[in-house]
Image (cartoon, helix red, strand yellow):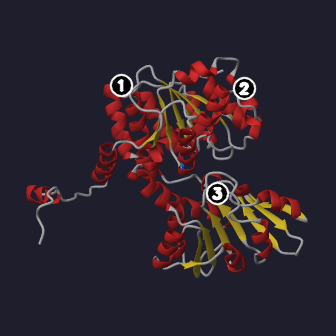
Amino acid sequence: MSYKVKDISLAEKGRLLIEWAERHMPVLMKIRERFSSEKPLEGIKISASLHVTKETAVLVRTLVTGGATVTLVPSNPLSTQDEVAAALAEEGVHVYAWKGMNEREYYNAIGFAISQEPVVTMDDGADLTVTLHKLALGVKSNEVSYALETAGDRDFGRLIGNIYGGTEETTTGVIRLRAMAKEGTLRYPIIAVNDSYTKYLFDNRYGTGQSTWDGILRATNILVAGKVVVVAGYGWVGRGIAMRAKGLGARRVIITEVNPVRALEAVFDGFEVMPMSEAAEVGDIFITATGDINAITLDHILRMKDGAVLANAGHFNVEIDVAGLERVASEKRRIRDYVVEYELPNGKRIYLLAEGRLVNLVAAEGHPSEVMDMSFSNQALAVEYIVKNRGKLSLGVHKLPDELDMEVARLKLETMGIRIDQLTEEQRHYISSWGLGT
Ligand code: ADE
């Protein structure tokens, strides 16, 4: 079997979606053009655990054009666009993905990606890399046993030893992989695509800033103007969400933070800052973007106003205490797609969106193509870099070289028709000399 998708007859719809994304991803398309003549990935087997979206399809087609054989599995059980999965499967990509997987199916998909014996892995959240390491180390867990059901009986130590390197798309994944590197567990080098300027400054801020609201609005159709919005976390994602909340007319935008520098930045950017225990009592819409567990606890939820809406924009579904909410709720009703109403023992009703998972990818389509153009150009260049430098990268988590990052920015500006100044010789000399003062 080379694919497992929801419905292969959705392929034509998927092709149109991918075509639409390609129109809006000119930088990645330029890279594809180069890959088409240079074939830098000839014979390379790639297994990718990424959100299966139309933008990911543009990346996958680019890798295939470069000569790679690609296996694609999801990086979240609910984010797959079934039409896109069908279209890619029909094109010969080994796709194992559908929207609405349970935990076992999700790790079966990860196991399938491993069974293809890749030499490059691509990850968004690090589930593929971490599971592969657990298999090689003989770690036992539910996830590992589900992965084993499809990965089959093989020598995972040898498999992992053959891998040239991997890429990681998101902050959460980079944090996990850095922890592995620090502990000495990491067995192959990783390029942290997330850490490119042309990734996190745009994808995390403007991409999540817009797509999180897209998800909340598609799910609820509520008016933001006049509302009190509470954003937990003022990293790049939190910044983007808060900025767009202002633009949509929120009456108050409140930030909760644990980092004093970030909290101060939020204040100077014009937002209110307070602890979640206080914000809980005044907010209408709560959005978590901390990357950590229990940013919103059951205690916070019990303090909230009747009708409060809760959404998560962080990678994993751990930021809101959904288990606590489930435990105490006297009633639970599905109101509409991605909106569940919980009645609390105090009689108030709280609305949880997208089961507390990434609201932008579950209730909408993730980041717009224009932003993913830069993120996925970094991904394509990172895979090429790994292949070119196989055997030379040290075991650890690396940034993509700055020249490649700058090249993505240069190409993006060019495709937008925007020109910029160049340093004059005199200026270049001035900023590289230490002797010139007052
Ligand atoms: N992450 C956020 N938005 C995405 C998208 N549109 N495609 C793939 N990964 C994403």
How far across and down, in percent of the image, does residue 197 sit?
A: 39, 53
On whether ligand 1 comes within 8 Å of the CB at mark 2, the answer is no
The amino acid at mark 3 is Asp
Q: Residues within 10 Å of mark 1 (few under 14, many from 20)?
A: some
For the residue marked with disc 1, what is the amino acid? Lys
Question: Is residue 382 or residue 77 the one in the foreground?
Answer: 382
Q: Residue at x 52, y 38 (%)?
A: 15
Pointer 3 residue Cβ closer than 8 Å to ligand 1:
no
On screen, 322 above or below 402? Answer: below
Q: Which residue is mark 1?
A: 39
Looking at the image, tell me whether mark 1 or mark 3 is earlier in sequence order: 1
Instruction: Identify the residue at the far left of this view.
Output: 426
| Tag nearer the camera, 1 or 2 | 2
Residue 91 position in % (x across, y down): 53, 28
Q: CA distance from mark 2 to mark 3?
A: 28 Å
Left or right of residue 288: residue 425: left
Tag 3 residue? 292
Rendered location of residue 396, percent (x, y): 47, 37
Q: Which residue is mark 2?
A: 148
Reading the chain from its start, which is encountered first: label 1 or label 2? 1
Q: Is residue 272 above or below residue 152?
A: below
Is disc 1 in contact with disc 2, using a CB cutoff of under 8 Å?
Answer: no
